[in-house]
Amino acid sequence: MTLVRTPEALKHARATLGLSADALARIVRVEDGRTVRRWEAGEREIPGPVIVILETAIGYLDNIKLIDIQLEMLRLGKMRSGETTRAGRVDQTNADIERLTASRKSLIEALEILTRQPAADGSDRVHWYTLQRATPLFDPSQKDEWTIPGEVSPEAALAYFAKHEGFSEGLEIADDEGPLMEFVLEKREVLRRQIGASQRLGAGRLVDTYLVRRRSK
């Protein structure tokens, strides 16, 4: 685990994450970049919550890099995985590639949420969004629910689902009920729990719901 407890470590972590002093200030909700520069100069003590955010972010980044190395080795055949059974050795390389790819995606999403910067007026506070089929299919081969744990608006959440979950025609919020109301979008507060040096996110109180349909061609 990379520690961010000194002015030098703070500056290095900020640079590693590609953040300006002003950008980091917005993420940790302080006045401006001057405060960050005072931390980096050792003029002020680094607040505990800032340490937690940066150590968590760097931890996510380190894990992403480690997964990238493992994926490259698996895909190039430099590393194989499997287990030996009575029937012989069972190759699990493809399964491990799928597992690592899913883990990488989750880490990238968590990093994006953690380092997301609010607007100056604070209007884009992130929420937990869940898209559900209005009538579940109960088909194991098809999903009935999709989740994004931190987005700034319902429109942004729908854009994410359209891009990453196969809704190539796009999704839109409907103004009224009708036969095409295939989905319901829930907007909930994001609950943050501190577990050691990491933050865990969860869905909180329901804030609003929206009727959603596929975009008409």
Image (cartoon, grey):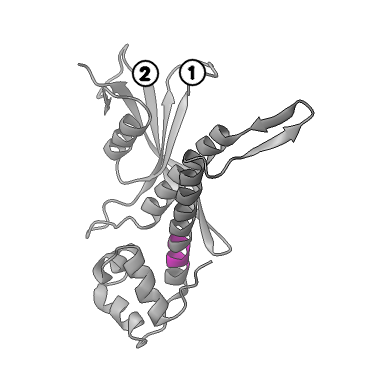
The quadrant the N terminus occupies is bottom right
Check disc 1 and report the residue beneath it: 136
Check disc 2 and report the residue beneath it: 182
Neighbours of disc 2 within 10 Å: few (<14), some (14-19), many (20+)? some
What is the x, y in percent for residue 194?
54, 60
Residue 157 occupies quadrant = top left
Q: Amino acid at mark 1?
A: Pro
Res 23 seen here: yes
Q: Secondary structure at mark 2?
A: loop
168 relative position to 133: left or right: left
State the predominant SS element of the stretch in magenta.
Answer: helix
Q: Amino acid at mark 2?
A: Glu
Nearest to N terminus: mark 1 or mark 2: 1
Q: CA distance from mark 1 to mark 2?
A: 10 Å
33 relative position to 2: left or right: left
Q: Outermost residue, bottom direction?
A: 43
Which residue is found at the position 50% from the left and 46% from the top? 73
Q: Looking at this view, is 211 or 172 the one in front?
A: 172
Position of residue 184 relative to residue 110, above or below, is: above
Which residue is found at the position 33% from the left and 55% from the top? 116
Extent of the magenta region: 52-57
Residue 11 occupies quadrant = bottom left
Position of residue 194 relative to residue 206, above or below, is: below
Magenta highlight on residue 100: no
Position of residue 23 relative to residue 181, above or below, is: below
